[in-house]
Each structure stands twice: as structure tokens, then as C-alpha cells.
Amino acid sequence: MHIVCCVKQVPDTTQVKIDPETNTLIRSGVESICNPYDLVAAEVAVQLTERYGGKVTVISMGPPQAESALRECLALGAKEAILLSDRAFAGADTLATSYTLSQTISRIAAVNPVHLVICGKQAIDGDTAQTGPGIATRLGYSQFTYVSEVVSVDVENNTIKVKREIEGGSELIEGTLPALLTVELGLGIPRYASLPELARALRQDIEVWGAGEIGALPERLGLRGSPTSVHRIFAPPVREGGRVFDSTENTERAIEDFVEVFFEKESPLLEHLLSQDKG
Amino acid sequence: MPKNSKGREIAEIIPEKCIGCQLCVGECPVGAIVMEDGVAKIDPEACIGCGRCFDVCPADAIIFEKPRKKRMTGVGQAPVPVDEYKGVAVFIEIREGKGAEVSWELVGKARELAGKLNTQVLGFILGTDIKPVGEEAIAYGCDVVYMIDAPLLKAYLPKVYGNALVHLLEQVKPEILLLGATPLGRDLASVSATRCETGLTADCTGLDIDLQGRLLLMTRPTFGGNIMATILCRNHRPQMSTVRPRVMKLPEKDGSRRGEIHTLDFAAPEDNLPRIIDFIATPVEADAEDITSAPVLVVVGKGACDTRHLPMFRELADLMGGAVACSRPVVQAGLLPYERQVGQTGKTVAPKIYIGIAVSGAVQHLVGMQSSDKIIAINTDRNAPLVRIADYALIGDYTEMVPRLIKGIEARIQSFEGKASKR
Ligand SMILES: Cc1cc2nc3c(=O)[nH]c(=O)nc-3n(C[C@H](O)[C@H](O)[C@H](O)COP(=O)(O)OP(=O)(O)OC[C@H]3O[C@@H](n4cnc5c(N)ncnc54)[C@H](O)[C@@H]3O)c2cc1C
């Protein structure tokens, strides 16, 4: 079985902030990491090949540094990695990204048929769960999002059975291969790579493909192929803090004060809430 | 303005302002811009001083002083004749035979947008036996409802729903389409945006209209909630956006409203479709509450992640007619199930009263609860982010404070009830 995994390098979002006064980005010490959801996707893919045989190819679109995200996946047990890096890809929104990735997957599949494509459910830095379905739609693959369990894959009969988490419960669903899955965080815990695996991952050659290699139409790539554009960025509105009741001196008093003020200031709200509850 | 060794005036990047979007990298005709540590960098010797990077930069992070007008960004592919597209459409999701609440919230927002654009609100409904939902859609504010009623649409399959929705979009040509950011909504939005080759912005928290260009201003948190971005889709239609439940206000239902309902046919896709074998409803526990609809939430943080105190938190929640929710570490520790997690990777909540007990208020948590009416924070740390934005901050150890708080509130409630019985 041949599985392609799409991964993205993202800034560690916990560290990116805007200075509300100057409206500029504070990014000192911001590290780039492999999107946590995508690491789970790679782990799941590797586990599937351990169960059913076959190999995992990881692909990532990004600047040359995105190579390190690919190496993280190689260390988990992926066999091959391709970096999609070209100036023409820059500035892509999800539509252009899904075009670039699906074009790449078609190229890979032409040489070595692809049974499964696995993506993380979403990236932590922005685009929310759109790229996966976009790729499946373009390739015409069966599409299973929010997968919480891969029940079985049958390459001979070309079928896959998965469990998906949807509103109100989970769904057991069966479809044909090739298929694209987007996976929940809970589906796997990325393993700690062994030293030899790490060494292999660091040494391995990573192919770099550009627009030419994937036979893409230039007008559908990157900025030119992106219908959406960023108009403005700004710091999120901050809520003003209110009253502080400090109990380090006297807990009893602080709580009494709070209850007093709270019930006085919010009395319409509370009366409504509490009477509704009783009625 | 700086010059390079060839004496050419060149563009310069202000690293602090650069958001790392790479638009300039793609735009530079000579490949003079590279990304370094997440920030764009111009090679002064390669730069030809054309200023195209300056034109596309959304963050004003490029200095380029030759006099020229700033051009609009986002060229897109073959633009569509945008004038042919009219109306603000909402995809109305069906849940257990009824319209999902988030869809009605969006109809409310669509009314406001349509008012500004002086156009109609359109409801798109897919499913089986959906006539009553169509009428409800009008009561909530749709002017015209288009539905496809077919047995194949009973359960969600991406290709089938995708075909049906794209068919509606091609027939009706709305300028805007809004969908709820539910599992189904996100999935379907992406499938249909890809098929229509149009732009889609996920999880918007603000929607407005730029009247000049009849453009939808789609504002959403990005970088995990640290930054807000307003996104535009200039040359493609429909302009599509998903919005999480509870972000927009639920409008009043008005049974006397009148509107039209049209039913359309559609061609089912022919390939062998996936087969849903089983649906396992999440077991409804005795105390199962939906944290997104509770008026009061008692939110347990990592500092209060203690089984022994769970009954106390429940007592506080019960007292105020609310539910217990939590931050992510509490789910990871296994104290409460994922359904109760608030935040970026959990649920967005906007209760009347949010009570955070030993919750620090990390951005990923804040994005999921910032629009709560009143925030109370109980924390030993005066400088915790949640404490800073709380309307009421109680500083101290929760094990000391919560029992007293419960007593204090109980006493107050009794006095309310006293008042009520006197009436
Ligand atoms: C991609 C990503 C997604 C995420 N998604 C979410 C999400 O959806 N939801 C979410 O909540 N988090 C999310 N997180 C995690 C988030 O970054 C924080 O780690 C988390 O919210 C912290 O939870 P906390 O406030 O409960 O714990 P902590 O940050 O550890 O805070 C504990 C607080 O308790 C206080 N405290 C300790 N003891 C006491 C006491 N006895 N009395 C009173 N106060 C006390 C401390 O002062 C401290 O402020 C996400 C992170 C990432 C990277």
C-alpha cells in the first residue's frame, strides 16, 4: 500500500503576538514546527504500513526550511519525502494549495499508484480543515474527514472502512480506494524516533519539486491562483479587566464583597437566570 | 531610500512588521526575496527596484518610496463577471429533521449584510422531507428558499452534497454564501469552493460589507488567535465563509414573514459512493449538557484538575443553572470528556456568565470564550491573562474560595426566592 501524507510547517502559534500599540508582529524566538495534526497523520500512515505493508511518502509545500518538517516525518518512519518549493507557490490560499498538492499527488501516483492520502484535520496557524477536502475533490478520491479510527483497509478489493466523528456521534463508513482521510489528534501519538531512524532521517536526500515538476498551470499557483487575499491585520480587541477581589488577606471578606457587588451590578441578569432556573 | 551597489533604489523590509505571508516572495519578478526565520528578506544586489513587493504587502512591512499608487492584491485566476451574482445565501444544515441553530444565526447575519447590499437573503436546503425547514427559514428571515429534496440526500456524503450545492450555486448565483463551521459545513464548504474555484474563509468571527466594491469583509482569528485578519475575495463568486456556532446572534423567529420556496432537481453523481454502515450516537449521559447552550459555565482549569473537587464545581454550576466545562489540559488528564473543552480545538462558547476556576487564559482558550457576557476568574495569579480580562477577578486559592462562594450565592438565591414568593 502506498500512502501519501501532506504536512505543513507552521510557526509555533503560541509565540506569535501583535503589539497592540504599534500593531506590529512580535515574533522574537518564534520557532517553526511541523503542524501537530500532520505529525499525527504521518504516525497513522506509518502504523497502517506496519499493519498492511507498503510505504509512506510525505510531501510539504513551503520554503526550503520546510524540509525540517519532512525530516520529522522521515524520523517517524516515512520512506520518502518531497519538498514543493518554488517562488511560484508563494502566497497560496487553500484553493491554490489544494491545486498544488493534488497536482503533486497525481504525479506521484503516475509512477507509484497511491491508495491513501492522509492529512491532519487542520493546521494550527490558519487554514481550518479546508485543504484536505479540496485535494480529495480535485483528485476525485473518496473523502473521509474527522477520522477517529481506521477500521480496515483492503487493498485487494479496493475498500476502506473508517470511523468519523460528526455532530452527535460517530459514523462507520465504507468506501473505495483511493481515498483521502483527515485525522483527529486523538488517532495516534507520534512516536519518539530511535537514534538510527533519526540519523537516517537527517541523512536522507529530499527531492525538491517546483512548478515544472508537477506540470502545473502557472496562473493557478500561489498568489495568482488564490481568490482570497489578506486585506488587513490587527491585534484582537482586548477586553478591559474589571474589579479585583483579593483574598490573600481575608478570604471571607473578599468573597462577601464580591457576592455583594456581583449581585448588585448584575441583578437583572441574575434574577432572570436564577428565576428561570427555578421556573 | 537605500540604494544598492549599482546605485539602484531598492525596497526594504521592516522585519517587525513582516507577517511571513510570502506574498512578496511570489510577486518578486527576479527572485530577490527569500524567507529567513519566518521573515521576508530582500537581496539588495538582486533587487531591481520595481516596487511590486510593496504593492502586495498586506502588512505595510515594505518601504518603497518611489512615487506610485498602491495596487490591489489578490489577482486570482480568470475573474468571473461579479455583477451577475446577487443575494446573500445561507446553507441551512439539517439536524434531526430541523434546521441547525447555527444556520439561523447566519440567516440573522445575512439579513444585516443583505440590508447593506440592498439585496435578498436566500436559504439553501438539502435533504429529504425538508418542506417544514423551508418555512422555518422564512420565519427566521430568508426571502427566497431553494431546496433539493431527494432520498440520496438523507445522510451527508461529500460528493452527493457537493453536486447538489454546486448545482444550486450555478442556478441561483448568489454573491455570498455562508455556512456553519460544523463538521458537515466545513467539509461541504471546501468541496463546493474547490468545485466553483472560488475563495473560502474559515471560522470568521466578523462579517461586514465594503460597499464600494460590494465585497464581503471576512475577519477571522489567525495564528491561534493572536492576530486578527480581514480577508477579501475580490474577483470570484460566491464569496464563501464559514462561521462557528454561537458567534452570531440568533434572530427572532417571526411566523408572519412571507417568502418564496422553490424546489429544484439535481443529477446524482454516478460513481460508487461510500456506504454508511452505522451511526453510533454519542451516549447521552445522565448529566450530559451542551456547553455551548448553557447560560452559565463553570470552567475547570489545570490548577483545579482534581477529582475530589469535581462535585463542588458541579454544585456551583447547578446552583446557577449552568454546566461544567474545562480547558484542554483537563481533558488530557482525563477528568472531563472532550465535549466539555472550551477553546480553539474545543468548542466556542458565549455564556451569560463564564466562571474560570484556575484557568490561566491561554490564547487558544480565550478565542473560544471571549464573547462571554460576564467573565469571572478565580486564580492565585493576579497576572494570569484571564484575570486581566475578567469583569470580576477573585484572587486566591480556589479550594478556599469556591466553598464560600457557593454559600454566598445560596444565601442570595434564597433572598430572590423570598422576593419571588412575596409577589
Ligand atoms: C494547537 C493548540 C491548540 C490548543 N487548544 C486549546 C483549546 O482548545 N482549549 C484550551 O483550553 N487550551 C488549548 N490549548 C492549550 C493552551 O495553550 C493552554 O496550555 C491551556 O489552555 C492551559 O490550560 P489551563 O489554563 O487550564 O492551565 P494552566 O495554563 O496551567 O493554568 C493553570 C492556572 O491555575 C492557577 N492555579 C493553580 N492552582 C490554583 C489554585 N489552587 N487556586 C486558584 N488558581 C490556581 C494558576 O495560577 C494558573 O493560572 C491549545 C494549545 C495548542 C498548542
Image (tube, coloured by chain):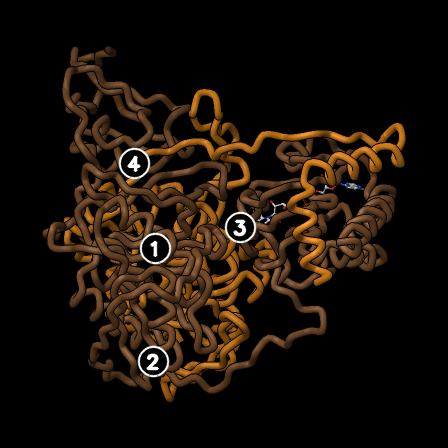
Chain colours: A orange, B brown
Pointer 3 local density, CA inside 10 Å: few below 14, some 14–19, many at least 20: some
- Sequence-wise, the earlier of marks 3 and 2 is 2
Amino acid of disc 4: His
Residue at the image position 33 percent from the left and 33 percent from the top: A232
Q: Nearer the viewer, residue B236 or A28?
A: B236
Task: Please tell me whether residue B184 is drawn above or below residue A53 in the rendered image.
Answer: above
* Amino acid carrying mark 2 in the image: Leu
Q: Which residue corresponds to mark 1?
A: A82
Question: Splitting the image into 4 quarters, where does residue A178 fall?
Answer: bottom left
Quarter of the displayed picture in which ligand 1 can be seen: top right
Question: Is B1 on the left or on the right of A174, as rendered?
Answer: left
Residue marked by disc 2: B153
Instruction: Judge depth for marks 1 and 2 and give the one in front.
Output: 2
Q: Quadrant of the C terminus of chain B?
A: bottom right
Q: Secondary structure at mark 1?
A: strand
**Disc number lying in front (4 or 2):** 2
Dot 4 crowding, Cα within 10 Å, few <14, some 14–19, many 20+: many
Q: Is mark 3 within 8 Å of ligand 1?
A: yes
The chain under label 4 reads: A
Badge 1 and badge 2 in a common chain: no
Q: Please name the amino acid that badge 3 sits on.
A: Gln
Disc nearest the viewer among 3 and 2 = 2
Q: Quadrant of the N terminus of chain B?
A: top left
> Which residue is labeled 3 in the image?
B344
Q: Quadrant of residue A278?
A: bottom right
Q: Which mark is residue A231?
A: 4
Q: Of residues B202 and A262, which is closer to you in this image? A: A262
